[in-house]
Amino acid sequence: MVKAQIIDQRQRGEFEAIVVRQAHIGTDHQTIILRLNGAGGAAFAQAQPGQFVQLACRDIHNPRSVAPLLRRPLSIAGIRITTDQTEVQFIFRLRGPGTQWLGHRREGELVNLLGPLGRGFRLPESGEQSVLLLGGGIGLPPMFFLADVLRAQGFNQVVGFAAARSRESLTATFERDTYNTTRCTEPQLVLEEFNRSSTPCIIATDDGSLGCKGSVVAASEAFLDRQPKEYKPLVCACGPQGMLRATAELAEKRDLACQVCLEEYMACGIGVCQSCVTRLRNGEDDKEGSYKLVCSHGPVFDARRVVWD
Ligand SMILES: Cc1cc2nc3c(=O)[nH]c(=O)nc-3n(C[C@H](O)[C@H](O)[C@H](O)COP(=O)(O)OP(=O)(O)OC[C@H]3O[C@@H](n4cnc5c(N)ncnc54)[C@H](O)[C@@H]3O)c2cc1C
Ligand code: FES
């Protein structure tokens, strides 16, 4: 059973946030922490794991700053709430003009954002439920926020799985000193972002340069094989489509509940432009499904409903 998710969409809005911190993660990722006060702070204090923002990656108050025109979606990687303000963390890969612009913002500068957007992960009713968090590439950051919230709500049987192409492309801060390479198939407290919720994790890289060699789905299947028969965790996943599809198939095969966070290409992020459609089944007999908007009906869906193209 999962808790009914109540999101007050009126809480979302367009806000100015102040850059508090910017730091590099590995060779091609950065983390940025933005501070929001007032209505923005209150809106983000309600944010749920799996929700995202649409960031304006230019100075929208300067009429000559016109590119990139479209906002860029980023998942919330963490939230820190104090009495009168909320700090929101993002972790992003430096790719094109949007993320390059964001990567050059310095402490004290303003960033305009829309959010929190979408519908996030639905948490289980009982803190007794075990949960596996699978994150691949830029799908890993929302898993950190989910781990924080699960821990705060008393879930203490949570295991993370972090996937990357190689050691350098891991979307997280790796704590080398605490890592035992020979026990790479066992969950360990080695990623700073998972450690803040005391969530142990298994790392998998495509090239084997860190952790288990191979896919995160293979690593999680090997982990499941070592657990007792009655172990039935909820599986939550975010990452590339191939990884999500393989995760959904694994969950189906083992009769595990599974929620996936889809990161489709998005333009508006608020249900207006129709650029983010995906097909969802309305029941077991509905093989074809019907189109839904990832930005506003999701991005988190029950994996059994997704029609994988
Ligand atoms: C809901 C959602 C949450 C996201 N969360 C994160 C996050 O937490 N961290 C992060 O680094 N990225 C995240 N992304 C992807 C991020 O939005 C893109 O990387 C970003 O828009 C690239 O903008 P850019 O101007 O830097 O590069 P662009 O020039 O716009 O694109 C650079 C390259 O990235 C590709 N790209 C753009 N969008 C996506 C996408 N959605 N999926 C795969 N490839 C894409 C483009 O095809 C191009 O090859 C998320 C996307 C969505 C839809
Ligand atoms: S991104 Fe515009 S409708 Fe979803």
Image: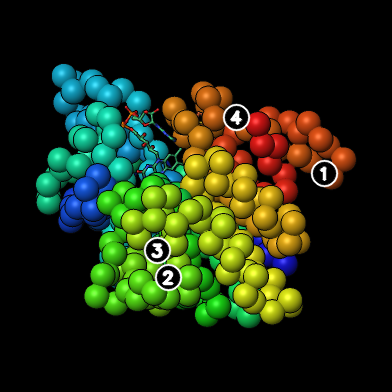
Distance from mark 4 CB to nearest ligand 2 atom below 8 Å: yes
| Amino acid found under the numbered disc labelled 2 | Cys
Q: Earlier in the sequence, mark 2 or mark 4?
A: 2
| Amino acid found under the numbered disc labelled 4 | Val
Left or right side of 19 for 231: right
Other residues around mark 3 within 10 Å, as few (<14) / some (14–19) / many (≥20): many
Residue at figure coordinates x 61%, y 62% from the top left: 221
- Asked if marks 2 and 3 touch (Cβ < 8 Å), the reply is yes
From this viewpoint, is residue 63 visible?
yes
- Identify the image quadrant of the C terminus: top right
- Asked if marks 3 and 1 touch (Cβ < 8 Å), the reply is no
Q: Position of residue 8 (x, y in %)?
A: 54, 52
| Amino acid found under the numbered disc labelled 3 | Gly
**Which residue position is annotated with label 4?**
277
Q: Earlier in the sequence, mark 4 or mark 3?
A: 3
Q: Which mark is residue 184?
A: 2
From this viewpoint, is residue 90 visible?
no
Q: Say above or below: 110 vs 39.
A: above
Residue at figure coordinates x 31%, y 23% from the top left: 69
Q: Position of residue 215 (x, y in %)?
A: 50, 53
Q: Give the distance between the C-alpha atoms of the residues marked 2 and 4, in whole angstroms.
A: 38 Å
**Which residue position is annotated with label 3?**
211
Residue at figure coordinates x 48%, y 70% from the top left: 185
